Amino acid sequence: MAGPLTVGEFARITHLSVKTLRHYHQVGLLEPAQVNPDTGYRYYSVAQVPTVQVIRRLRDLEMPVADVKAVLAAPDAPARNVLIAAHLNRLEAQLAQTYAAVDSLRSLLEGPGGASAVTHRTVQAAAAVGIRQTVDREDILAWWQGALGELHATARAQGLRPTGPGGGLYASELFTRDRGEATVFLPIETGHPAAGDRPVGRDRGASGDRAAGGDLRAGGQPRAVGRVVPLVVPAAELAVATHRGSLRDIDVTYGQLGSYVTTHEIGVDGPLREYYLAGAQDTPDEAQWRTEIAWPIFRAS
């Protein structure tokens, strides 16, 4: 039976540096077979070589040390496989995000495909139901997806008829300070609309009804349920540009619209708006998605 191996000998056998072996000992990932109590020298055994080879491959896959420790401590092969499969799924998701970022970067480097046309629009105050919350910018996508789904489900349950596409209001602090107020809303037809109220954005007709869930009765009175509350989307003067396709590169259209507003010196304080003309709730084909971005502006009558 082979005797104990010094840390240098074990490093040569496993192709892990002495520094790495010391680190793995410190974090509890790989304990030496023996530690001399007088000198503190560490010794390893040949039987630990297969374990090191597993550790090396898991770390090559960027598995966190804590997860590697969980794999090594798993009671059997099925339990180990569940942990490894979960990590591989995360890697695949990250790879998909990387591919999407590469495609977006290539499109930018190949040159603009034509700036989005900017139009000016006056919108009147509109009755709506919505969800309003202060959100961290890094959480906005997950919050938006959940809030929009909850909003449409509540509108369907209450039998409310949309008068236009759903939308969002986003405070400047969300962009400048990474935390601010966000609102998703759905303009609705009420039994007693306020004088002068008109639908927000463009009328989707039947498609607007489909987005909220089939044959809905008109004139329903919205009730506060959970996070969903009745609200009024304020009137505004807006510069509007349409973003087509996935929301991953919506910052490009934001940049074009913001540059237009700044160049013409017409921007005013107020939340930025989005109108979701077509999205994941309408079609799984991202190429068909359309989102209007609206920037508040000063506009002489």
Image: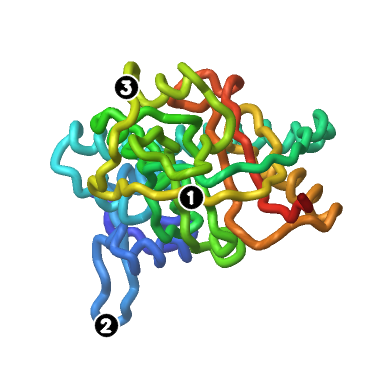
Q: Specify which label sits upstream in the sequence, 3 or 1.
A: 1
Residue designated by label 3: 216
Q: CA distance from mark 1 to mark 2?
A: 27 Å
Q: Nearer the viewer, mark 3 or mark 1?
A: 3
Residue at 38%, 45% (x, y): give it: 130
Residue designated by label 2: 38
**Amino acid at dot 1:** His
Q: Position of residue 142 (x, y in %)?
A: 41, 45
Nearer the observer, 285 or 25: 285
Q: Secondary structure at mark 1?
A: loop
Q: Pointer 2: residues within 10 angstroms few (<14), some, or many (20+)?
A: few
Residue at 33%, 65% (x, y): give it: 27
**Amino acid at dot 3:** Leu
Q: Secondary structure at mark 3?
A: loop
Q: CA distance from mark 3 to mark 2?
A: 81 Å
Does residue 19 appear in this view? yes
Q: Specify which label sits upstream in the sequence, 3 or 2.
A: 2
Please give left or right for residue 98 compared with residue 134 in the image.
right
Q: Pointer 1: residues within 10 angstroms few (<14), some, or many (20+)?
A: few
Q: Position of residue 240 (x, y in %)?
A: 69, 40
Residue designated by label 1: 15
Please give left or right for residue 261 compared with residue 159 in the image.
right
